[in-house]
Amino acid sequence: MAAPTEPGPCYLGWDFSTQQLKVIAVDEQLRVIHENNINFDKDLPEFGTQGGVCVHNDRLTVTSPVLMWAKALDMILEKMKSDGFDFSRVKALSGAGQQHGSVYWKEGANCILQSLSPDLPLHQSLKSCFSLSNSPVWMDSSTTTQCCFLEKAVGGAQKLADVTGSRAYERFTGNQIAKIYSQNPEVYTQTERISLVSSFAASLFLGAYAPIDYSDVKFGNVKLCWSAAKSSGMNLLQIREKVWNPACLDACAPALGKKLGHPAPSSKILGSISPYYIQRFGFNSGCKVVAFTGDNPASLAGIRLAEGDIAISLGTSDTLFLWIKEPKPALEGHILCSPVDPQAYMALLCYKNGSLMREKIRDELASGSWEEFSKALTSTAVGNDGNVGFYFDVMEIIPEAVGIHRFNTHNNRIPIFPKEVEIRALIEGQFMSKRIHSEKLGYKIFHGICEAVLQHHISMPTTRILATGGASCNKAILQVLSDVFSAPVYTIDTANSACLGSAYRAIHGLVEETSVSLTDVVKLAPEPRLVATPMAGVAQVYQPLLKRYMELEQQVLNRPK
């Protein structure tokens, strides 16, 4: 009888998202062998968050407690230990963080990071390490003044977009730093280092300040920009040169470059894991920490985006990534470099009112049950008999509006919809907005190879939508997505694509110097699964409805605040 084989190495992928801390472990065959999570509201109620954040009285300022993230990390590692997870097998780890959130380390914090006691949980050791206890996060809309100043300082919104990839956005880190410097100069003065959520998380594992990544990946022998997603989400980085822009730095705060440190490639091995984790949880001393990145680029690694695809993350925020050949630069959304094709581009659209809005309507109208929510959604007709709704619990990014706005088939405002109509109006409206604004950035639907394309011997990919995030488990929602976009929808086996992509990136970090591409690293991973196709006749329903939605959106924007 053959002796049982010893378990082989594995790799951890982390995601410090808005509502949860999540982790996935994969083995060398890319099989998921462990998943775990901590829900901030449920598991850490002492921090008083709702949806993982604290919305302040002005409804514009939105933060999260830094120590909540540190305590969650210790809790999830303890859960894994209780489940019998063998940390000594972990060869490398990487991770992702919600984009735009920032952490402010106090003078001397690096010394504490380097000498963590294994007898104490993280949050106790780090309780004096932050000059700001509540971190601004991506939902914050309180920096309009700073945005205007930054755009003016560099020559206008379009000029800033040309340099950094985006016009000034309230949630972007540079403007958040400018607000802190302006309103709390003593906090800024006490700050030794400013991290993003991703580099903060990497610092916890490394036991030292980790650099902010600029998501630069090598594919084969060609060095490509992986969207510079973390650094360019700050309005500070020159996305082509991968260096901080001096004019942007100076417009935000003095000596800011020193507090940010030098950005690093996202495939860089930052070092070995801190002794804290070796002594407290039994990690192998040779376990490597690969640079952490943003949740969006990590998700792209997890779902393996290809030419012609659209990636839509249906999470706390809804994010759309679009592969385009001919970008249309605009003052809404973001144009970035493609992670896998030097001739292509990625467009990004972000929406604040994603899952939190869906969950609110579910709780109000479907007794908190997704099953009841889905039944109501499927019981209504495609197009909702012409009823259209806009649902913005917090100030939205695209369009820049807030509140709930309902219109009947005659474009008249009405105060309330029946339950089933309300639920369909919410879901259809969210997806119609995504389609309309993605088309402004260059999105086109391709259904195979048409006659004209064949005559010119041009290969044209079929559009696929790759859905991820929590709502990608809901088939009724995905059917509406497929219908609105008139394209098939695919998912991967886990909704935690940022975790999965981070685990893939941990593997890639170990072999990157040998010029092995990330594509080669993940070639053994299972292909996405088809979960929804457009129903017959939906294009004829949505074509006029999309036009109406666009006109009604303008009415919502023009309404006096």
Image (tube, helix red, strand yellow):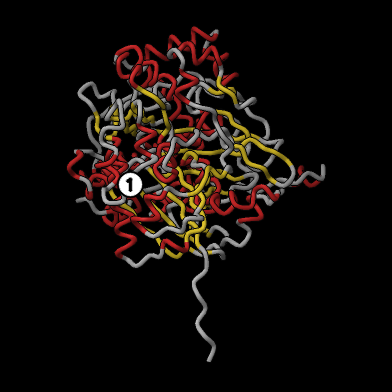
Is residue 212 visible in the rendered image? The answer is yes
Foreground pick, 44 / 558 = 44
Foreground pick, 25 / 235 = 25
Rendering quarter of residue 262: top right
> Which residue corresponds to mark 1?
20
Furthest residue toward bottom: 1
> Left or right: 386 with respect to 422?
right
Furthest residue toward right: 456
Percent of width and height locating residue 241: 64, 25
Task: Name the amino acid type tagged 1.
Answer: Gln
Foreground pick, 344 / 530 = 344
Percent of width and height locating residue 6: 50, 75
Above/below status of 275 relative to 148: below
Above/below status of 86 relative to 386: below
Under tag 1, what secondary structure?
Answer: strand
Q: Residue at x 25, y 38 (%)?
A: 417
Percent of width and height locating residue 219: 68, 45
Q: Residues within 10 Å of mark 1 (few under 14, many from 20)?
A: many
Quadrant for the C terminus in the image: top left
Rendering quarter of residue 99: top left
Q: Residue at x 69, y 38 (%)?
A: 223
Percent of width and height locating residue 536: 52, 52
Q: Residue at x 76, y 42 (%)?
A: 452
Number of marks in the rendered image = 1
> Left or right: 118 with respect to 290?
left
> Left or right: 163 with respect to 104?
right
Is residue 347 visible in the rendered image? The answer is no
